[in-house]
Amino acid sequence: MKSLLFLFLVPLFLTTEMHTDMDKDTKWLTDFEKALKVAKKDHKNVLVYFTGSDWCPPCKMLKTDLFDSAEFKALSKDYVLLYIDMPRNRDLLSPEQRQHNKDLLKKYNKKGVFPLLKIVNAKGKALDEYSGYSMNGEIRYHLDLLSRYK
């Protein structure tokens, strides 16, 4: 019984750590309206990152390969960052945050592709996107997307 409980708790701690790392390394918001207000005030576009933090291997690798890179950290200063997580573990998000994320998924990620980087202007208009990650360390396409709209 103890080992069964352990098997359920380990993924929870690993996923929680990923959220903490995302917040610690860069300033990711989780509220779309707040992100738009900041974008308008700062004259920036919003980078919306759709992820499945506890079930999507490419999302986890993209965090390491892209978001932890010096190139991303430099480019990210030109964006308001919005983190939209759709974990399978319902305990990772409040019901309100889960609904907020589902609403954004319906509007900006209709195909339910993960990971997805979407560039949105301060008025909420989608400008461009790049979906998927092959987990081979090649992040050039992601960086190219960010370079175009900074």
Image (cartoon, rainbow, N blue to C red):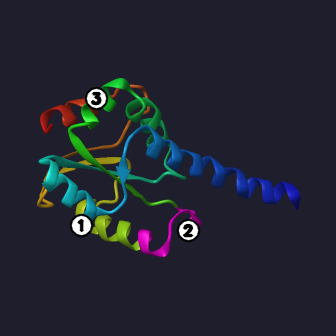
Q: Residue 78 appears at what percent x and percent y?
A: 20, 38
The 10 Å Cα crowd at callout 2, few under 14, some 14 to 19, many 20 or more, is few
Between the C-alphas of marks 1 and 3, the distance is 28 Å
Q: In the image, is residue 133 above or below residue 86? A: above
Residue under label 1, please give it.
Answer: 107
Q: Amino acid at mark 2?
A: Arg
Q: Residue at x 34, y 59 (%)?
A: 112
Between the C-alphas of marks 1 and 2, the distance is 21 Å
Residue under label 3, please give it.
Answer: 74
Work out whether mark 1 precedes mark 2 in sequence or the reverse, and give the earlier one: 2
Between the C-alphas of marks 3 and 2, the distance is 33 Å
Where disc 2 sits, the SS reads: helix
Q: In the image, is residue 76 above or below residue 117? A: above
Range covered by the magenta-colored residues: 88-98
Q: Does the magenta run of residues contain 72?
A: no
- In the figure, is residue 7 to the left or right of 32? right
Q: Main secondary structure of the magenta part?
A: helix
Work out whether mark 1 precedes mark 3 in sequence or the reverse, and give the earlier one: 3
**In this rendering, does residue 110 appear at all?**
no
